[in-house]
Amino acid sequence: MNKIINLRLKSKLLVYTLASFTLIYGATLAYISLQLRKNALEDSKSIIDANLKASRNLIQNDINQVITSTNTIRDNYNNYLPMDEAYRDEVFGNMLYGWCQNNPDLLSTWQIWELKALDSNYTMRNGRERNVVFRLNGQLKQTTERVDMNDEVLTSLYYQARDYNHADIWNPYYDVVTEELEGILMTSITAPLQDASGRFLGLVGVDISLNDMSKIISSMDLYEGAVSYLVSRDTSIVAHTSPDYVSQKLLSVIDSDSPEFAIGLDKTLQSEDYPFEYVNQKNEVEYYVSYTPVTFRGIETTWTLGIEVPKAVILKKANAIFYQSVIIGLIGLIILYVIVYFTAGNIVRPIIKSAAIAREIADGNLTAEIDVDDEQQDEAGDLGRALRDMIDNLKQIVNEIIESSDAINTASLELASSSNQLSEGASNQAASSEEISSSMEEMVATIQQNSENSKQTEGIALQSAKGIKESFESSKETTISMQEIAQKITIIEEIAKQTNILALNAAVEAARAGEQGRGFAVVAAEVKKLAERSQKAAVEIIDLTQHGVDAAEKSGKQLEDIIPEIEKTTQLVQEITASSYEQQSGAEQVNKAIQELNEVTQQNSGSASIFTNNSEHLTQLAAKLKEAISYFKR
């Protein structure tokens, strides 16, 4: 099988096609030849049967003509029966003579009277009168014979016919009555003379020679070794291919013990055709036998016409047809081989050219030219045109690929440069992102600290506002107390003034007291000093108190003025705190986004590196593609 697979296309076409054709053609030829042989055999059998029936028809036609004339004479006899006996005998004698004279093929014509039927006074039991006209040496002779018999045992054919009392054809016999006809195998066709009631009066007959039947039988021997014969009802051979068998019983001369012959004779007696085959055990020859009934118009008696043909002889023609068909088939097969050989060459030749072009294309030569007949509309032409179109398309595709590879190479170089820049930018961006991320983290920490500080400041501001309010209230109370102190000090000043006055008065009194009053004067002087100092201190305290009151009032007023600012500051600090928290949340989100941006930037940096590597790989692939495309010659 592998050897067949490795064959060239033409060889494969020849092997497969011729093998398939040989098998199919051989099987078809064998089938047709066998059918032809079978049909030839059947046709030969049909020809044999047809020839047999044609011969039968000839025999029937000849005898039926005699039967017709016999019946005509019989009818004429019936018309003359009522006439005078002497006139009737004369007319009947002339009729017999004229009948034999007008029919030269007849051996004789005759008429027999039953004497008892014509003469009621006739006393003999079986008396008859016979009138015969016969042919002798070309001349017609006429004889009359009278027989008077009382015998009870009657073997004569006449008496058998009298008992039968119907038209009949007798079994073959030799005439033992008319000496002139002795030695001639003949048969008689008879028709009874009857009165109106059908009573037997006599018999009209004609004798015919059966030698003419041998001529008909001989004409049937179309096949070598064939045997044909005509057999009467009692199986006597009327005519035979071998004259020695004439008048013998058929079953006694047949060189076979096959029962088919007896069956065939019985079938023909029933007016049936009966073909059969048998093998002669003595010579091992197979025969085809066909029997057909020979029937006669108006007569119940049936004869048999048969033929025996060796099947080898029949098959000789069939075999000749078979061998002729085989020879014709072989010649046809040889012609088919030649046609297939040249057809395969015509089929393969364009394929070989196309394969050569395909090899040129495979070798990269796109400049190869293919010779294609545009008017060739078969598959080979389609293949050639397809290859030509493929070359043109490949040229165009290769040119486009080269242009594209150049463009890819240029673009890959630009892409590599851009990717390098992108990689550097991504790296810088990643570093900047790292710094921004760090700064954002610090800023978030600062904002968070500021938020904490703002929150503490808010508490401090609230506490300060509360303290200032308390200070303002204390200042107001202090002012009131200082005013009260000033009032009290004024009283002290008045007391100092009074004390000073008293001291002066004491000094005056001490001076008046002299020496006793010197100590008192001293005390009065000291009291005066104390009074002066107290007054001075009171004045100073009053001034200070006044300044304190003014300062306290001013401070209270300032505190009163600063309280709304402090409250506003507290509110602003609260807002700053809230903003700090919001700023902290936003900063955290920004920080998170920057972290994500940093990750993306890091990824972009990695992608830029991959992109750079891919662009470099693309540049290498473009160079390889350009190198690969350079394989094709345009």
Image (tube, grey):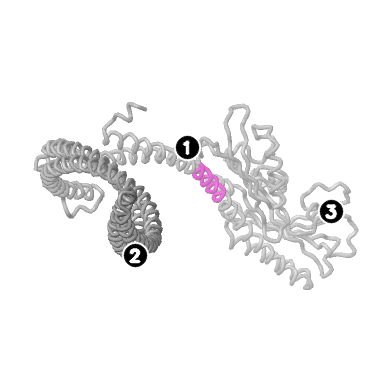
Task: Please tell me which residue lies in front, 142 or 534.
Answer: 534
**Residue ID for mark 1:** 316
| Residue 230, disc | none
**Label 2: how many Cα within 10 Å (few below 14, some 14–19, many 20+):** some
Find the magenta span and give its range.
Answer: 38-51
Name the quadrant containing residue 419. Answer: top left
**Left or right side of 486 for 395:** left
* Residue 428 percent coordinates (x, y): 17, 41
Asked if one can make out residue 500 in the rendered structure from this viewpoint, the answer is yes
Tell me whether the residue at label 2 lies in contact with that at label 1, contact meaning CB atoms closer than 8 angstroms.
no
Identify the amino acid type marked 2. Glu
Please tell me which residue is depicted at 36% across the width and 35% down the height of the picture.
19
Tell me whether the residue at label 1 lies in contact with that at label 3, contact meaning CB atoms closer than 8 angstroms.
no
Identify the amino acid type marked 1. Lys
Quarter of the rendering occupied by the N terminus: top left
**Left or right side of 367 for 113:** right
Task: Please tell me which residue lies in front, 508 or 580.
Answer: 508
The tag earlier along the polypeptide, 1 or 3, is 3
**Residue ID for mark 2:** 560
Separation of disc 3 and disc 2 at Cα?
Answer: 205 Å
Tell me whether the residue at label 3 lies in contact with that at label 2, contact meaning CB atoms closer than 8 angstroms.
no
**Residue ID for mark 3:** 148
